[in-house]
Image: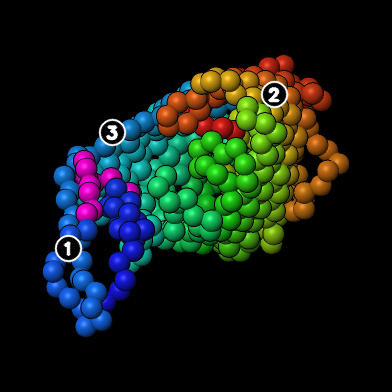
Amino acid sequence: GQLYDNRMTDDLRDALVATSLFQSVSVVPQRTGRTNPDGTEQVDLLVRQEKGPARTLGGNVGFSTGQGFRAEGTWQHRNLFPYEGGLLASVIAGTQEQGLAGTFRRANAGRRDRTFSLTAGANHSNYDAYEAFTTSVGIRWSYDSTPIWQKPITYYYGGELVGTNESVYDFAQGRNVRRTYGIVALPGQLLFDRSDSLLNPTKGFRLRLNASPETSVQGSVKPYVRAMVEGTFYYPVSSSIVIAGRAKAGTIQGVARDDLAPSRRYYGGGGGSVRGYGYQRLGPFDPNGDPVGGRSLNEFALEARYRFGDFGIVPFIDAGNSYESSTPNLSSLRYGAGIGGRFYTSFGPMRIDVATPLNPREGDGKVALYISIGQAF
């Protein structure tokens, strides 16, 4: 009984394409000759679909001065548990991180583009800040953007159980010790996105808010809250130049820093933070010269993205730090600057950034290199 709308026909086709289960899809209106009481003709929709491969192999590889090489491979079956119940297995092999994970994912769970997922994994990380053996299970509901439908508001919420054994510097004993933590978390995120692209935005802005009430069990129960807010903007100066900026602030409330598992603390520095400084190398240090993390963080970045054809040049300046206090401040900002190259492909830009610290501390390197896929933010 609804009035025929060609936009809804196109939307149905887009929804079928977004499942990634079909090689080809067409949705065509068909005249029926049947007449409604108001004199209008009924229309059927003829859907033709060709089954596509349900299994996918994928991977990504990256290198940065602080994190070394990191490679991840994935195997996915998108429809192992019809309808749209997929299984994803992943393995991480890197110089400083190794891990295995498995995820059950139900796409379009009760609503278009809402996803339910159940994940279990084990991971080993070995960084200057800590060495951790971690196992985790998590459950999550999310409402996501897709390349076909980029939404102005997306979100996720869920729960997480983590068991982790980590090296931590004990200031009372004056040495590194190993401690085991049990963590229960309820992470959530709200994203307001008014940019024009998921992978390579050239105008608009994004605002992201993360909050995670958590309880850590390590001798006693210690509840606390981790929160983070981040904003980015993209302003086209001309058809070939885009000014991009980012500001980020985080806080952990309700617990002393030394009662937190090192992997749950905030760290600054690295390719996704303040370039020019080593990964997790911004913030407080222990007497051995290793980072111990903090309860707050602030970061700022400004880029001028100049594109010519499939190539680009990006000068940038970053600033930020992490702090022992639960409130970030501007008193001890560290600055890094550099220049990057971009090669634009059909799936996003390849990125190479070279940066140097502008106000380095003793022990900071002179040059840092980052290679990855996608813009820095």
Secondary structure type for disc 2: strand
Q: Which residues are magenta?
A: 18-28
Left or right of residue 226, residue 109 in this image: left
Give the CA distance from mark 3 to mark 1.
42 Å
- In the image, is residue 349 part of the stretch drawn in magenta? no
Q: Which mark is residue 243?
A: none
Q: Which mark is residue 57?
A: 3
Which mark, by number, is residue 315?
A: 2
Task: Say if 41 sits above or below 130 in the image.
Answer: below
Q: Label 1 to label 2, Cα distance in Å?
A: 58 Å
Q: Nearer the viewer, residue 182 or 268?
A: 268
Check disc 2 and give the amino acid type.
Answer: Pro
Tag 1 secondary structure? strand
In the picture, the quarter occupied by the C terminus is: top right
Residue at figure coordinates x 86%, y 41% from the top left: 331
Q: Is 299 in front, or is 292?
A: 299
On screen, residue 112 versus residue 181, left or right, reads left
Q: Residues within 10 Å of mark 3 (few under 14, many from 20)?
A: few
Mark 2 or mark 3: whose residue is earlier in sequence: 3
Tag 1 residue:
31
Residue furthest out toward the front: 39
Say if 140 sits above or below 349 in the image: below
Identity, as a three-letter code, of the amino acid under mark 3:
Leu
